[in-house]
Image: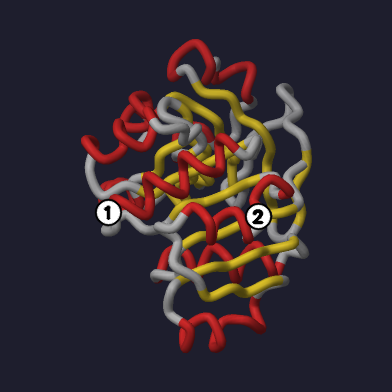
Amino acid sequence: MYKSFAILGMGRYGRELAKNLYDNGADVLIADDNVELINQLSANATYAVATDLSDPENLKDLGLSNMDVVVVCMSRHVEASVMCAMYAKEAGVPLVVAKACSQRMGKLLKKVGADKITYVEEEAAQRAANHLVSDNLLEYFDLSDNLCLIDMKPKAEWVGKDVRELKLRDKYGINVVAIKKGSSSFPVDPEAPIEKDFELLIAMNKNDVKKIL
């Protein structure tokens, strides 16, 4: 399990990510070249550093080699993003995630060492589109280039039938990971009927999502 994170760049995405990680008990280092902003956000991080992230000497001082994950959040600043991704990987960080504003920039960040690229605007648009076309979809989580995790209400024709009977994996290529009812979550019983007030946590290929909306 990842325990220590460095969030480089305190735009909206970086701020929200850092705050949520810190609130969930992770050790979080935040860094940005805006001194005033860093001072404002220091209460929501373990360490807060104001520094020029395009300078490799400054990156060295951050101690990124001690981090489990480095997230580069400066998609509008190509030079700094490339420098941070490259340095983090060379420092031996197990997972380097970089935010990109275009496919071209994503390919560049991959080449210099980023393990995963996130296209925040595209992913937000995908989630919004899925919500708009389906009343059943509650939440959409991006897992990788191909996989996603969705939280959804059961389709009307699924209610009263069990997972084995529905053959969801065969028909839709989906795997029901867990079931939620109210505030409780529990493993899937393949022979237990699906109830109307269930929430289904489902792992599946992104290309197959449209099949169940």
Q: Amino acid at mark 1?
A: Leu
Q: Amino acid at mark 2?
A: Phe
Residue 134 appearing in the image: no
Q: Earlier in the sequence, mark 2 or mark 1?
A: 2
Residue 20 appearing in the image: yes
Q: From the viewer's perspective, is residue 31 above or below residue 7? A: below
Of residues 196 and 5, the one nearer the viewer is: 5
Q: Are marks 2 and 1 in contact (CB under 8 Å)?
A: no
Which callout, 2 or 1, points to the residue nearer the camera?
2
Circle 1 is placed at which residue position?
A: 132
Q: Residues within 10 Å of mark 2 (few under 14, many from 20)?
A: many
Quarter of the figure with residue 6:
bottom right
25 relative to 133 in the view: left or right: right
Q: Quadrant of the N terminus?
A: top right
Query: SS for tag 2?
Result: strand
How many labels were placed on the picture? 2
**Residue 205: image location, x then y, percent:** 43, 24
Q: Give the residue drawn at x 69%, y 52%.
A: 181
Q: Quadrant of the C terminus?
A: top left
Q: Give the residue drawn at x 66%, y 83%.
A: 43
Q: Give the residue drawn at x 26%, y 40%.
A: 105
**Residue 60: image location, x then y, percent:** 60, 54
**Residue 87: image location, x then y, percent:** 52, 43
**Residue 141: image location, x then y, percent:** 49, 45
Q: CA distance from mark 2 to mark 1?
A: 34 Å
89 relative to 103 in the view: left or right: right
Q: Residues within 10 Å of mark 1 (few under 14, many from 20)?
A: few
Circle 2 is placed at which residue position?
A: 5
Q: From the viewer's perspective, is residue 64 above or below residue 86? A: below
Q: From the viewer's perspective, is residue 58 above or below residue 34? A: above
